[in-house]
Amino acid sequence: MERDLVIIGGGPAGLAAAIEAKKNGIDDILILERDKRLGGILQQCIHNGFGLHIFKEQLTGPEYAQRFIDEVEALGIEYKLDTMVLHLSKDKRIVALNPKDGLMEIKAKAVILAMGCRERTRGALNIPGSRPAGIFTAGSAQRFVNMEGYMVGKKVVILGSGDIGLIMARRMTLEGAEVKMVVEIMPYSTGLKRNIVQCLEDFDIPLLFNHTVIKIHGKNRVEGVTIARVDENKRPLVGTEKYIECDTLLLSVGLIPENELSKEADIAINPLTNGAYVSELMETSIDGIFACGNVVHVHDLVDYVTMESYIAGYGAAKYIKGERFKGEKTFKTIGMNGIRYVVPNFISPQNVREEVNFYMRVNDVYKNVYLIVRDRDNVIFRIRKNHVTPGEMERIKLSKDILQRVKDELIFELKEVAE
């Protein structure tokens, strides 16, 4: 079959992109979702805190997703559930499979990648010990508890202070489990400050920085873990070992953008984000293939995913209608001096509607600094920050007028405030 726009992924990114493309004149849209329902990961995120930027109110994950699902259905956008995409080529040919249609080959004029991200597992950590029951990623535990109705354990240790781990510390406590502690190998939390306060401090759950799990005990079921302090090279310090009795270990040790299809299509991947390099319209290195949401870089807030996905939907619509400018004046964005990465990576100002949101993460904890944006030696934006941390994404908004005056490259950096 031939379609104007195919969107791979029916989570918050794919839904927002589809809606924006439809509103910009693209009627022939197909969303492919591998789960049995739309909404993506939000369906298992039953806590509130979503939608403060987009809807100016606090919603749960399912409530936030449902608003977009309702709009997709009201607009008559077609979607296929329980559909696994097996292959994507650079000429925008998609091979997908589901029980109803069987094997499908779809030729698209444009493609939007919205596959989200996956969790890093125990296998990536090489923790010594056998393989007993009771070891879960925080996200899989969240699904078991919130959607399947299974309690995963009674005495819990959480490794990693990512947002899902922090939220599950609170969730397990509310379900009657004893959360012994959260152990973090870094000297800072990798989650949002509000989650540390609301999920740990409000429930008196200890958070140990510069610590990790060095052994898992138990044969049939987890019986305990040994934790230890680590040095500046993240190696366990001899003599600091401590045994913690528990029956469950939850892992919240990082998220990885789901980019196997992107690599198959020869899309250039940024090693700093593990996601595609993207332009101001969220277009990848392959003409007509766009990407948005956690498949590009891991976000803190679903509201930012939605904002980014609106741009991808708009960009795909411009591309299909032949209204997208290419390469007349393009410059790179560069993160340095404390800025780990910046998204988007390339800017063609003539494609910008009114402004561009630049998202970035710092590489360490910094206090009392200026976040500076400059074009060579010309500072075009500066804001003072009392505290920045890798766990909190930074966002800067620059107007089209400013971007049209950039000559060479846009540099984002931190500088200490002179006392």
Image (cartoon, grey):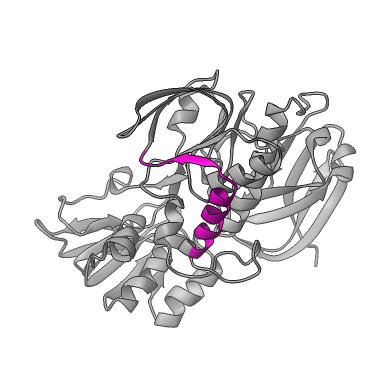
Residue 13, image x, y percentages: 55, 47
User: What residue do we see at 66% from left, 69% from top?
Assistant: 56
Q: Quadrant of the C terminus?
A: bottom right
The answer to whether residue 278 is seen in the rendering is yes
Residue 123, image x, y percentages: 28, 44
Q: Report the magenta residues as a range.
A: 63-82
Q: Is residue 145 above or below residue 113?
A: below
Q: Quadrant of residue 302?
A: bottom right
The answer to whether residue 338 is seen in the rendering is no
Q: Is residue 199 above or below residue 187?
A: below
Q: Is residue 125 above or below residue 67?
A: above
Q: Judge from the rendering whether residue 175 lies leftward or rightward of residue 257; answer left or right.
A: left
Residue 71, image x, y percentages: 58, 53
Residue 386 belongs to the span the image colors magenta = no
Q: Judge from the rendering whether residue 285 lies leftward or rightward of residue 325; answer left or right.
A: left
User: What residue do we see at 61% from left, 52% from top?
Assistant: 306
Q: Quadrant of residue 237?
A: bottom left
User: What residue do we see at 55% from left, 39% from top?
Assistant: 272
Q: Is residue 281 above or below residue 106?
A: below
Q: Residue furthest top?
A: 91
